[in-house]
Image (cartoon, coloured by chain):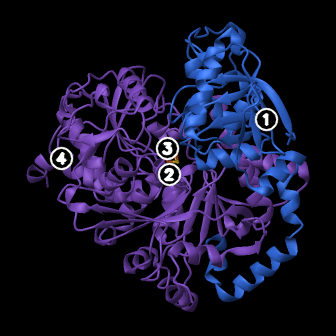
Chain colours: A blue, B purple
């Protein structure tokens, strides 16, 4: 996982509530058994006017000029500004893989769906929840000013506007630590293998039905 | 001792260690796996040279990509086929039990787990699939995870989790005739909204919940994710225990007795405190139909498509306008006037035997309306299909003009060949009416199996309660 510390980037506003993971990456792209290459199909049904299928050459597709990602002023954006309940629906981590592959490292919204929020941290993407009125203000600012950027500082848990206004966001210390250092969570958990084995031993005695259920015996 | 909620009890039983930062390492008892969200996790294991911690806790099944017709020919789409074959080879390599596509027990992962007794009360159950909430019906802590977490559970049998807040949704009283668990689920979402459960785990209780069969409880818990909560649960009672007795993966003999004694305690203590309580009067619930592109865009069968100008919140108003445009509906039109092109009875929400029976009662002796192009029934598993055939339900459906398919996710998300064409409108018993969910440009209305069956016969939405006296 790529670490994330400080980032200043162009912000693209996606002004819809309840953006679901089906919209972020439509199901036909979930057939891939790989973890990369989803970026060209991020928001596929909104981004292109033709119907996308895996394996198509994105450069030959008919883009929807009205969709915000296709507007030249937002090219090279690395921060996505969104509305309430972003990432709801299916648990597909492909949604985060697509955002990350496209180049987004930060998503800002008033609220996120739970599983999506978790998935972000496994992939070096920061979901930052800011109060709804702050997000509203950012939407207005981004739309008013081409080239608008925000500066994200994960260590300080702050997002700063070009005018220097700082907005704090909350994040769990463990997730922050992993993201700042690009750590492999599995490796960290396996440091506690003795604890896991001891727990398992105890449960085998106290709740044996959880283990007889193994293998359909 | 402090009074505990069911969620507290399940949580406390599974803490391997407190990480001291607000999270705990939680032990996972049952890990269900399907072909779409697992290949990258297995690949991760291989790259790191790791093996599953406890392969016997894993049960795998291909369901999303499998064809629902003519299975003998295999999967024609090469990309789908590769994904299913990848699951097969991963399960072989890592010694994981898999019900393959040609296994009579194959089906939707959330149908087969309970059906096999692989989901037991008091377990933590995870799957790389948001509708894992279904399994909470058994008094289990069950939630969906992403692929990185699938890999984490495979490698460590654990997950780092932060405890959620607890919400109690009490559905008191009795549902009227023709009202099913699906209507209750939609009524909950109508009340609290699609983000209303965010950050919570929901326990459903009250007389109307106690009265539900396990199938109904699964339907209710299944849609918890659509209310934003990760997990939904129902306390254990005799209905739970009777359902599990004799299932293949369930314990037997003396261990069964011990298990049952423990399971009976899996309920919230009478004076347990919840962070939020919502009360719904079951008697007030009517058959519900979604009109928009989010499950909270829902109204009663005797209602009308809303007028966006009457929505005060500007963001919500724009959402409603956009939804009406996508759905091709006119503001203010009666729900009953909406004509349907396709009918889908299936999905992990409503594809169990009881759902098929409820639909069959409505269609028996009648015929699908002329304007309906395709009406299909997709049983949730091979065993559901077999039982339905033994009861003669398949003949009721086919005589009425329905197609009787092989089990799988099918048109719930249209990863296989079953899908809506652009502009087509579907009465669907699935759980998501998102844009494009059932096929690009497709228009989905979520309803109960009985309501979907009634729409098939009428060609438009109708109140199934007007059907019942004509039914069986
Ligand atoms: S039936 Fe639908 S919701 Fe359920 S697991 Fe399959 S795709 Fe997901």
Read off the chain for label 2.
Answer: B
Name the residue tied to disc 1: A152
- For the residues labelled 2 and 3, say whether their Cβ atoms are less than 8 Å apart: no
Read off the chain for label 4.
Answer: B
In the rendered image, is residue B457 in sight? yes
The label shown at residue B409 is 3
Residue at position x 19%, y 37% in the image: B457
Q: CA distance from mark 1 to mark 4?
A: 54 Å
In the rendered image, is residue B115 in sight? no
SS assignment at label 3:
loop
In the rendered image, the quadrant that contains the N terminus of chain A is: top right
Name the residue tied to disc 2: B225
Q: Are marks 3 and 4 on the same chain?
A: yes
Q: Are marks 3 and 1 on the same chain?
A: no
- Neighbour tally class for label 3: few under 14, some 14-19, many 20 plus, Cα within 10 Å: many
Q: Does any atom of ligand 1 lie closer than 8 Å to the CB of label 3?
A: yes
Name the residue tied to disc 4: B464
Residue at position x 86%, y 52% in the image: A184
Residue at position x 64%, y 77% in the image: B12
- Neighbour tally class for label 2: few under 14, some 14-19, many 20 plus, Cα within 10 Å: many
Q: Does any atom of ligand 1 lie closer than 8 Å to the CB of label 2?
A: no
Read off the chain for label 1.
Answer: A
Read off the chain for label 3.
Answer: B
Q: CA distance from mark 3 to mark 1?
A: 41 Å
* Relative to B336, B125 lies left or right: right
Q: Which residue is outermost to the left?
A: B469
């Amino acid at each position: 996982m790529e670490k994330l510390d400080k980032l200043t980037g162009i912000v693209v506003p996606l002004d819809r509530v309840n953006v679901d993971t089906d919209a972020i990456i439509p199901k036909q792209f979930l057939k891939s058994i790989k973890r990369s290459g989803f970026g060209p199909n991020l928001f596929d049904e909104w981004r292109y006017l033709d119907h996308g299928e895996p394996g198509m050459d994105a450069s030959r597709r008919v883009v929807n000029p009205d969709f915000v990602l296709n507007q030249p002023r937002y090219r090279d954006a690395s921060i996505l500004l969104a509305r309430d309940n972003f990432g709801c629906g299916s648990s597909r981590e492909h949604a985060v893989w697509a955002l990350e592959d496209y180049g987004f490292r930060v998503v800002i919204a008033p609220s996120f769906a739970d599983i999506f929020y978790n998935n972000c941290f496994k992939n070096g993407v920061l979901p930052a929840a800011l109060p709804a009125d702050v997000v509203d203000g950012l939407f207005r600012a981004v739309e008013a000013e081409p080239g608008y950027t925000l500066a994200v500082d994960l260590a300080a848990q702050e997002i700063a506007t070009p005018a220097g206004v700082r907005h704090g966001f909350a994040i769990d210390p463990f997730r922050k630590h992993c993201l700042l250092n690009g750590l492999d969570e599995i490796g960290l958990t396996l440091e506690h293998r003795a604890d896991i084995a001891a727990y398992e031993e105890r449960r085998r005695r106290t709740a044996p039905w959880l283990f007889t259920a193994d293998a359909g015996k | 001792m402090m009074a505990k909620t069911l969620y507290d009890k399940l949580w406390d039983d599974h803490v391997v260690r407190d990480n001291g930062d607000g999270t705990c390492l939680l032990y996972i008892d049952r890990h269900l796996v399907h072909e779409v969200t697992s290949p990258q996790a297995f690949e991760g294991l291989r790259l790191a040279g790791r093996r599953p911690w406890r392969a016997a806790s894993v049960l795998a099944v291909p369901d999303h990509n499998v064809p629902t017709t003519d299975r003998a020919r295999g999967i024609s789409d090469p990309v789908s086929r590769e994904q299913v074959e990848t699951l097969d080879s991963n399960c072989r390599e890592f010694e994981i039990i898999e019900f393959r596509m040609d296994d009579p027990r194959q089906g939707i992962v959330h149908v087969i787990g309970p059906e096999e007794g692989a989901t037991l009360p008091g377990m933590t159950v995870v799957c790389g699939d948001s509708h894992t909430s279904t399994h909470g019906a058994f008094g289990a802590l069950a939630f969906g995870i992403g692929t990185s977490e699938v890999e984490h559970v495979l490698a460590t049998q654990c997950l780092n989790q932060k405890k959620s807040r607890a919400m109690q949704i009490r559905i008191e009283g009795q549902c009227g005739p023709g009202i099913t668990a699906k209507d209750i689920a939609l009524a909950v979402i109508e009340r609290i909204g699609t983000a209303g459960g965010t950050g919570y785990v929901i326990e459903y209780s009250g007389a109307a919940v106690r009265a539900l069969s396990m199938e109904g409880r699964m339907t209710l818990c299944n849609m918890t994710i659509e209310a934003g909560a990760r997990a939904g649960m129902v306390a254990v009672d005799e209905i739970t225990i009777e359902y599990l007795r004799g299932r293949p993966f369930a314990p037997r003999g003396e261990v069964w007795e011990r298990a049952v004694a423990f399971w009976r305690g899996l309920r919230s203590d009478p004076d347990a405190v919840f962070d939020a309580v919502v009360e719904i009067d079951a008697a007030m619930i009517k058959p519900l139909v979604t009109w928009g592109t989010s499950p909270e865009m829902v109204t009663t069968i005797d209602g009308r498509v809303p007028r966006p100008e009457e929505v005060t919140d500007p963001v919500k108003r724009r959402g409603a306008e956009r939804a009406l445009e996508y759905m091709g509906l006119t503001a203010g039109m009666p729900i009953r006037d909406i004509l349907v092109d396709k009918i889908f009875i299936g999905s992990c929400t409503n594809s169990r035997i009881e759902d098929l029976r409820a639909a069959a009662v409505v269609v028996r002796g009648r015929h699908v309306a002329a304007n309906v192009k395709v009406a299909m029934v997709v049983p949730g598993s091979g065993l559901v299909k077999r039982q339905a055939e033994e009861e003669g339900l398949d003949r009721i459906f086919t005589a009425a003009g329905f197609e009787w398919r092989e089990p799988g996710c099918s048109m719930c998300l249209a990863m296989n060949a079953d899908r809506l064409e652009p502009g087509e409108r579907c009465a669907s018993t699935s759980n998501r009416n998102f844009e494009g969910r059932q096929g690009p440009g497709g228009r989905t209305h979520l309803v109960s199996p009985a309501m979907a069956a009634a729409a098939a016969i009428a060609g438009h939405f109708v109140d199934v309660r007007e059907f019942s006296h004509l039914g069986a």
